[in-house]
Image: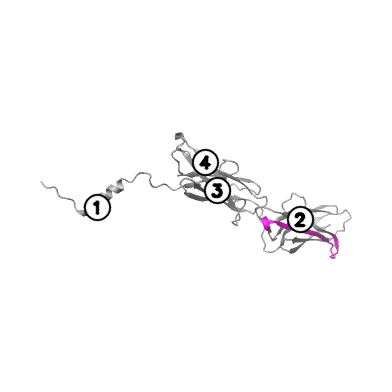
Amino acid sequence: MQIPRPSRIATVTLLTAAWVWFIPAGMAQTPLHVGSAVCAQFEDGPPLGALRLVPGEIVYFSFIADNFKKSDTGKVALTGHAQVFDPGGIPVSPKEEILILTILSEEDKNWKPKLRAEFALPPIAPPGTYTVRYDATDEQSHQAASGEATFEVEAKFVAPSNVLSVRELNFYRNQDDTTALITPTFRPGDMVWVKFFIVGYKIGEQNSIDAGYDVELLAADGTSIMKKEDAAMEKSTAYYPQPYVPAIFNLALKATMTRSVYTLVITAHDANGNQTATARSKFQVN
C-alpha cells in the first residue's frame, strides 16, 4: 500500500509548529518591577494612610523590587533612587541613591530586596500632597522601572505673592497664642505680641534669602513715637526655597502710656530683589 506524501502546505505547517514547541522556557525575561511603596513615620513602620506629617518631620520610605536578575553565582545588583517633591513639584531634598549588592543562596530564592530612604521635611513648608518619585535599575539585565507614592503634610498656608508683601499682620495676647485678637485692646503696661509673614522676596543663588523688616509705632495724630530699623533679618541658604519668612516680636507698653489708638507700621525689605513693602495695623490702649 502506498502512503500518500504530505502536501507542501502541510509540511510548512508541521515545521512551524515544531519550531514554536521548542522555544526554551524563560528565554523572554520578565520586566523588572518596583512597587509596594510605603511612607512611614519610622523605619519599616506601617503606611501613613490618612495620617499627616508636619514640617520638620522625617519621612521613612521603602519599596520592593521584583523580577531582578540573579547570576549563576546568585549575585544581585540593583541601584535605586528616591526623591520627594512638594505640592508645586519643587524637590524638597537631593535625590537619594540606594544600592543593593548581595549574593543569594538557594534558601533565598524567594527573597525580594527592600530599598529604603529617609527624607527630612523642611522646617517651613507648604501644606498639601507631597510626591515620592522612585526608581530602580538592574545592573545585570540593564532593565529599569519607576513609580510614585504620595503622603500628606499639614502646615500653615501663607498665600504666595509675586512681589514683596506682608501677610497676616496681627496682635496676640501671649507668645504661644495661635488665634489673633479680633479687636486688639490692651492696657498700659501690657505686653503686646505681634506676628506676621513676609512673602514675595526674590530667591537668590543657592536659594538664598536676604530679607528683614523695620518697626515703627505711630500715635493717633501720626507722630512717630518709636522706630527700630532692621528689627530682624533673615539671611540664609538652603536646598529647598523657603516659601515665606515668619516674624514675631513684642512691644512692652509703658505704664504711663496714653489711652488712645496706635498704629503699628511694618516695612519689609528684600535685598535680593531690591523691594520694600509696608503694612499697617491698629490697636487700642484703654
Q: Are marks 1 and 3 in contact (CB under 8 Å)?
A: no
Secondary structure of the residue carrying numbered label 4: strand
Identify the image quadrant of the C terminus. Answer: bottom right
Amino acid type of the residue tagged 3 in the rendering: His
Q: CA distance from mark 4 to mark 3?
A: 15 Å
Measure the C-alpha gap from mark 1 to mark 4: 49 Å
- Residue 245 is left or right of residue 146, and the answer is right
Label 3 CA crowd tier, 10 Å (few <14, some 14–19, many 20+): some
Q: Which residue bears the numbered disc 3?
A: 81
Check whether the beta carbons of the residues at disc 2 and disc 3 lie within 8 A of each other. Answer: no
Nearer the viewer's eye, disc 4 or disc 3?
4
Residue 15 relative to residue 35: left or right? left
Label at residue 12: 1
**Coloration mode:** one colour
- Residue 155: give x, y in percent of width and height: 65, 52
User: Can residue 180 be seen here?
Assistant: no
> Which residue is identified by label 4?
101
Near mark 2 (Cα within 10 A), the count class, few <14, some 14-19 or many ≥20, is some
Q: Nearer the viewer, residue 72 or 268?
A: 72
Residue 201's image quarter? bottom right
